């Protein structure tokens, strides 16, 4: 399949300049030889028009910035808004199946964002990504994910969801039917280190995005990532969507809970169709290096110690770890069943769906068991330090009741933790270039 680059760019910028010089030279000679003949005047008028058109397209190329020089399209590099940029957006958003949808995926270079974007693109939907490529964790992994998306003709704009002009421009170019909002400041414990980043992305960024969605005409349906952490100190198990969520244990959880309240107001006032998905500790290939299964793998392979937290009274912590492919199915089913937003021109025209679903695995596994599965896959013992869980936002356990998602979305997770971790470890070893336990090519 031809790459997007081949489809959109005639050649290299250098080559374009040579052609341009050649046009000038040819024209001068031609003017001397033929300008007296009236039939050739007409031909040359046509030629001049073509020349001007080619000059203008070269200008737009220069204005748009060059993907050959820097693989970024941020406004700082002069990329966003040019004709070429618009062409890339349109091509990426093109729907290639009947009844397909066009989706703006925020956080597209993130873990879940990459997988969902690929799944949508593969079945023929239009997908445009946006991601700010921040350095919360190694941005080279985000860039590698973008490489993967690129190779499937998914274009990712480098920009922040707080950038109003950028969002307005994107909706100018494409009438998105859906927004899959996955951009967020993730991580439970990091909220104590950098609280403002949570407010910036999960609250301010969300509002900026919803403002854009509310004014768009037509309004898109919005599906977005909430979190299992909203259950906080809830001790009723398994967690159902109707359980209490007013006792968050971390600022991360509080901002996700705030997101549920904020999206509700946009549904109520402006008629936006909203689906919030409470993800339960998602893991898998191309995952997030800040999460336990990922950092444990890295440390075990490097012979470094890992810290295993334990709850009160020496009770092991447990998580309802959920494999990425199951989460992707839940996300896609949510888009497909979202129902329409009803507003237009910033005004509500009727009631629109407001839904919240748990997307979990329904079988919690303790952290020590997670470690022993990794040890088996890596054929190496971990150096474990067991530590009483510090008061850093963690909750003792999570366990999803998924009956609602099963009923409304047909959601049915099929990957257990040993199977999913086997796939993760396989990916990890090949991505980081391990050869018989030794890293050969750290990226
Ligand atoms: O479901 C969610 O909504 C969240 O899931 C994820 O949070 P968590 O469930 O906390 O996952 P993760 O960090 O992998 O820790 C897993 C376990 O390992 C324990 N843990 C962790 C680190 C460590 O060094 N030691 C340790 O014992 C730790 O105490 C915990 O018991 C996402 O990161 C978050 O963004 C959000 O999406």
Image (cartoon, rainbow, N blue to C red):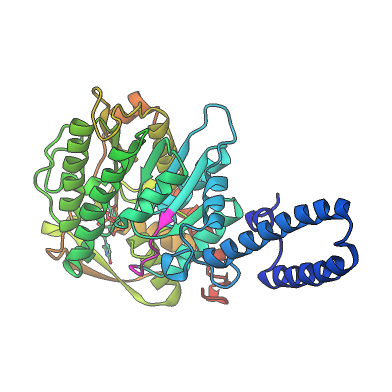
Outermost residue, left side: 247
* 384, 198: nearer the viewer: 198
Q: Position of residue 14 (x, y in %)?
A: 69, 73
The stretch drawn in magenta includes residue 424: no
Left or right position of 393 against 355: left
- Ligand 1 quadrant assignment: bottom left
Q: Position of residue 186 (x, y in %)?
A: 28, 58
Find the magenta span and give its range.
130-136
Residues 348 and 95: in front is 348
Image x and y of residue 313, in percent: 11, 57
- In the picture, measured across the screen, residue 123 lies left or right of residue 398, that is right
**Secondary structure mainly formed by the magenta segment:** loop
Residue at (14%, 66%) from the top-left corner? 390
Q: Residue at x 57, y 41 (%)?
A: 122
> Relative to residue 225, is residue 148 depicted above or below?
below
Q: Nearer the viewer, residue 205 or 293?
A: 205
């Amino acid at each position: 399949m031809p790459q997007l680059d081949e489809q959109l760019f005639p050649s290299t910028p250098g080559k374009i300049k040579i052609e341009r010089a050649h046009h000038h030279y040819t024209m001068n000679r031609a003017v001397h030889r033929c300008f007296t003949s009236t039939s050739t005047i007409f031909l040359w008028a046509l030629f001049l028009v073509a020349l001007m058109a080619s000059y203008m397209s070269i200008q737009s190329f220069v204005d748009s910035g060059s993907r050959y020089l820097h693989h970024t399209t941020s406004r700082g590099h002069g990329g966003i808004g040019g004709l070429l940029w618009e062409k890339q957006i349109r091509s990426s958003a093109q729907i290639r199946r009947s009844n397909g949808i066009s989706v703006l995926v925020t956080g597209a270079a993130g873990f879940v964002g990459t997988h969902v974007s690929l799944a949508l693109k593969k079945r023929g939907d239009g997908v445009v990504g946006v991601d700010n490529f921040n350095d919360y964790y190694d941005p080279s992994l985000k860039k590698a994910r973008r490489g993967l998306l690129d190779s499937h003709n998914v274009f990712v704009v480098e920009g922040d969801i707080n950038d109003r002009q950028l969002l307005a421009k994107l909706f100018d170019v494409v009438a998105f039917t859906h927004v899959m909002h996955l951009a967020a400041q993730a991580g439970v414990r990091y909220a104590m280190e950098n609280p403002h980043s949570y407010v910036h992305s999960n609250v301010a960024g969300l509002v900026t995005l919803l403002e854009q969605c509310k004014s768009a005409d037509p309004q898109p349906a919005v599906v977005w990532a909430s979190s299992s952490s909203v259950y906080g100190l809830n001790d009723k198990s398994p967690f159902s969507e109707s359980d209490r969520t007013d006792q968050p244990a971390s600022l991360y959880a509080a901002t996700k809970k705030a997101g549920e309240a904020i999206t509700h107001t946009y549904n109520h006032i402006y008629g936006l169709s909203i689906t919030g998905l409470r993800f339960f500790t998602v893991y898998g290939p191309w995952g997030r290096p800040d999460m336990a299964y990922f950092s444990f793998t890295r440390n075990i392979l490097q012979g470094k110690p890992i810290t295993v937290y334990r709850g009160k009274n020496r009770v092991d912590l447990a998580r309802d770890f959920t494999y990425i492919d199951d989460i992707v199915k839940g996300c896609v089913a949510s888009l497909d069943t979202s129902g329409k937003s009803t507003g237009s021109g910033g005004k509500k025209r009727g009631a629109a769906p407001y839904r919240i679903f748990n997307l979990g695995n329904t079988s919690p596994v303790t952290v020590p068991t997670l470690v022993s599965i990794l040890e088996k896959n890596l054929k190496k013992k971990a150096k474990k330090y067991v530590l009483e869980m510090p008061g850093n936002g963690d909750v003792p356990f999570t366990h999803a009741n998924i009956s609602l998602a099963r009923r409304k979305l047909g959601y049915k997770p099929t990957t257990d933790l040993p199977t999913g971790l086997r796939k993760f470890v396989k990916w990890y070893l090949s991505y980081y270039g391990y050869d018989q336990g030794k890293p050969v090519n750290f990226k």
